[in-house]
Amino acid sequence: MINLTEGQCGLCAHFGEAHPQEPQLVQIRTSRSAPEQYVDSCGHSDHKLDHLRVSAISGCDGFQPAT
Ligand code: SF4
């Protein structure tokens, strides 16, 4: 497991945006940590048409904190 900090995909509202209630995604957000290999889709409008998949430890300027 890797600890996540603000700005990383695992804590972004766009990470797994299509299925925000998925148990593993909820666990990542509440624990602020993720398995090293965990990847999910990015729902940001600039990325979703490309079906971008990112790791929980990735990040970009489109970060928006998940609630
Ligand atoms: S790539 Fe950017 S917008 Fe997409 S989930 Fe990661 S931080 Fe959020």
Image: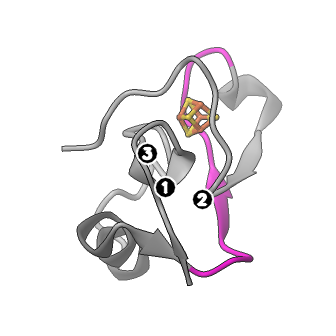
Asked if the residue under mark 1 is in contact with the one under mark 2, i.e. CB atoms within 8 Å, the reply is yes
**Residue 54 vertical placement versus 31 (above, below):** above
Mark 2, Cα crowd under 10 Å, few <14 / some 14-19 / many 20+, is many
The disc labelled 2 sits on which kind of residue? Answer: Ala
Q: Which residues are magenta?
A: 35-46
First in residue order: circle 2 vs circle 1: 1
Whole-angstrom CA distance, mark 3 to mark 2, is 13 Å
Residue designated by label 2:
56
Give percent across and percent down for residue 28. 39, 71
Q: Residue at x 53, y 19 (%)?
A: 62
The disc labelled 3 sits on which kind of residue? Answer: Glu
**In the image, the residue with mark 3 has its CB under 8 Å from the nearest atom of ligand 1:** yes
Give percent across and percent down for residue 65. 31, 35
Mark 3, Cα crowd under 10 Å, few <14 / some 14-19 / many 20+, is some
Foreground: 19 or 53? 53
Q: Is residue 44 magenta?
A: yes
Q: Whereabouts is ligand 1, in terms of quadrant?
A: top right
Quadrant showing the C terminus: top left
> Most prominent secondary structure in the magenta stretch?
loop
Residue 17, which numbered label?
3
Give percent across and percent down for residue 16. 49, 53
